[in-house]
Amino acid sequence: MSSGGCSIVWFRRDLRVEDNPALAAGVRAGAVVGVFIWAPEEEGQYYPGRVSRWWLKNSLSHLDSSLRNLGTPLVTKRSTDSVSSLLEVVKSTGATQIFFNHLYDPLSLVRDHRAKEILTAHGITVRSFNSDLLYEPWDVNDEHGQPFTTFDAFWERCLSMPYDPQAPLLPPKRIISGDVSRCPSDTLVFEDESEKASNALLARAWSPGWSNANKALTTFINGPLIEYSKNRRKADSATTSFLSPHLHFGEVSVKKVFHLVRIKQVFWANEGNQAGEESVNLFLKSIGLREYSRYISFNHPYSHERPLLGHLKFFPWVVNEGYFKAWRQGRTGYPLVDAGMRELWATGWLHDRIRVVVSSFFVKVLQLPWRWGMKYFWDTLLDADLESDALGWQYISGTLPDGREFDRIDNPQFEGYKCDPNGEYVRRWLPELARLPTEWIHHPWNAPESVLQAAGIELGSNYPLPIVEIDAATVRLEEALIQMWRLEAASRTAAENGTEEGLGDSSESAPIAFPQDIQMEERPEPVRNNPLHGTRRYQDQMVPSMTSSRVRVEEEETSSVRNSAGDSRAEVPTNANAQQNAREAVNQGVLHNANRNTRQRHNNTTTFWLRNAAEDSTAESSSSTRRERDGGVVPEWSPPTSNFSDQFVDDENGIGATSPYLQRHPQSHQLMSWTRLPQTG
């Protein structure tokens, strides 16, 4: 056992011993102290939900056992400030180096940058690594060095990079342990007594831990993958990989998934198995959507709370907690929606297609604020993932440049015919409809009274009538969109005439508050003036600039589409209180992309419900030169208030296959600095 001079490996969402670059670096450097810090308060309103905490508890236990078998324990710490806890571990172990793997959500970016600043100031060598993605976000840019704003273009560039993703690393053969005699572990409590009974049921269906993740991956590749293209829409059977919780917690490396699936692709190509090749392309595209969620989060750190298209700032959301409660409880009167929401509550899981159905119903039929739905998913999903969920809800809401059209409604009745043709999924989760014939299972309101009586169903009593009629929802959505465009046009005119100061800067627009009945409270921080620090360069990680100072708003916006000649990295608040600064940076600050050097350089993804967006389009296959850029931009456009698309599109278009506003109205778009993205919705 080492007596000092060891390296700390800071585990977060990389709970595995194989293909873990930070762990590999620590082992190469000598003695290792593995540390996990549980500081959920740092996440603000995104405190992990019950099922997510259950998974984390079991995954950490599995990791600790694996590390002990290799020679060192996992030190666990309970904290409200991760950086302060790291400093304490440094002092008690005599560590001289800290290694960790990158995260890409805004809070983590700020926290990690602050950790580097403070730890470096204490003489500690800090290095971070890519463990979560195929390519780093700053390495994937267009020919002008700008970030992509559509998925297809982004994924095409990833597939055509001049080098393949790095091969996965083998686990270490043994680990020399650092001295942890003066660094006792804290007991981490992830569940209270009221949660244990419900959580006990989860173990019947799920096995957290990195070695179990590898088993799930092997099972999928050698089984359902070959017929993935044919069976992926079926909600009543196990046709997907179920890898998303494993991927979220980093129990399996996306690079390993990519490489193993590509090996299968080559094998099937040599056999001439076209169905297998198609399945692989669709599955790899789902990996690409997961990559894209991190890419969007990095380049647009407000994407979890603001629509990426500015006109959505003016959409008249229906703030109706009664609708929200009916949706959560599976009492909307639409069987496929209700079955999905009851499965979610009971198991913490939803098939990707059902995620699309319930979220589309939430936004398009009920017209509830998309952030409410995203937050509820965060609180209830086993694979709750801020970046993936934000991208998913933005896609469904039509707030991405290539997202689903906002004027398109997915009729749950028709969706039921496609993903639950025999009604078995509905019968499983809605026992009150179990005796209803398949002919009527997805639209019981149309069933003859004699059929309903024979099935023991009394609509409006033991099963609700539809909460909103689809035809009425269609009309209401059209009216809301007309109102949105009128408000947007009036706002634009006022801004151009100078009669309304500050229009277009959405930082003044507060998000619609979360409903209080399910304790999704906002935790606002007071406005502070953080000093601007000089830029600091790190060779192993790039970060966007985040600061709560609004002094440079106009300067940034006027220069948002220029390429910078500078070579500086971003500024990030480094005040001693990480939790407060992180929230300021995310909730109140003015965010802009740093000047970045870009260098030359694919699961059942956690963006499950987004996966359908790409499944029906082919995976297309430009290297980027070394450039600098400043300020990402996204399109903002105003289509005419007519020509609404057909409401019941009987396909599964989406990212990479949809007909977005930009294509339908190319004459009306203009570029807008993403520092001005609205915060409403």
Image (cartoon, rainbow, N blue to C red):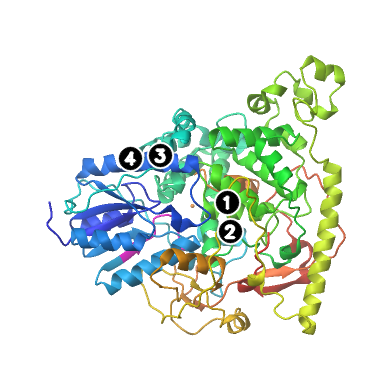
Image quadrant of residue 531?
A: bottom left
> Which is more N-terminal, label 1 or label 4?
4
> Which is more N-terminal, label 3 or label 1?
3
- Of residue 128 and residue 370, the one placed in the foreground of this image is 370
> Which is more N-terminal, label 2 or label 3?
3
Indicate the position of residue 487 as horizontal and vertical percent values: 81, 68
Q: Real-space Cα distance between discs 1 and 3?
A: 21 Å
Assign the C terminus to one quadrant of the image.
Answer: bottom right
Q: Real-space Cα distance between discs 2 and 4?
A: 30 Å
Residue under pointer 1: 389
Indicate the position of residue 73 as horizontal and vertical percent values: 23, 46
Q: Real-space Cα distance between discs 4 and 1?
A: 27 Å
Three-letter code for the amino acid on which mark 2 is drawn: His
**Badge nearest the viewer, 4 or 1:** 4
**Badge nearest the viewer, 3 or 4:** 4
Q: Residues within 10 Å of mark 1 (few under 14, many from 20)?
A: many
Q: Real-space Cα distance between discs 3 and 4?
A: 14 Å
What kind of element bears circle 1?
helix
Q: Is the residue under label 1 in contact with that under label 4 (CB below 8 Å)? A: no
Horizontal side of residue 10 vs 205, given as left or right: left
Horizontal side of residue 24 vs 482, given as left or right: left
Three-letter code for the amino acid on which mark 3 is drawn: Ala
- For the magenta stretch, what is the residue range? 127-136
- Of residue 575 and residue 248, the one placed in the foreground of this image is 575
Report the disc number at residue 304.
Answer: 2
> Which is more N-terminal, label 4 or label 3?
4
What kind of element bears circle 3?
helix
Indicate the position of residue 209 as horizontal and vertical percent values: 37, 39
What kind of element bears circle 4?
helix
Indicate the position of residue 180 as horizontal and vertical percent values: 19, 52
Report the disc number at residue 213.
Answer: 3
What kind of element bears circle 2?
loop
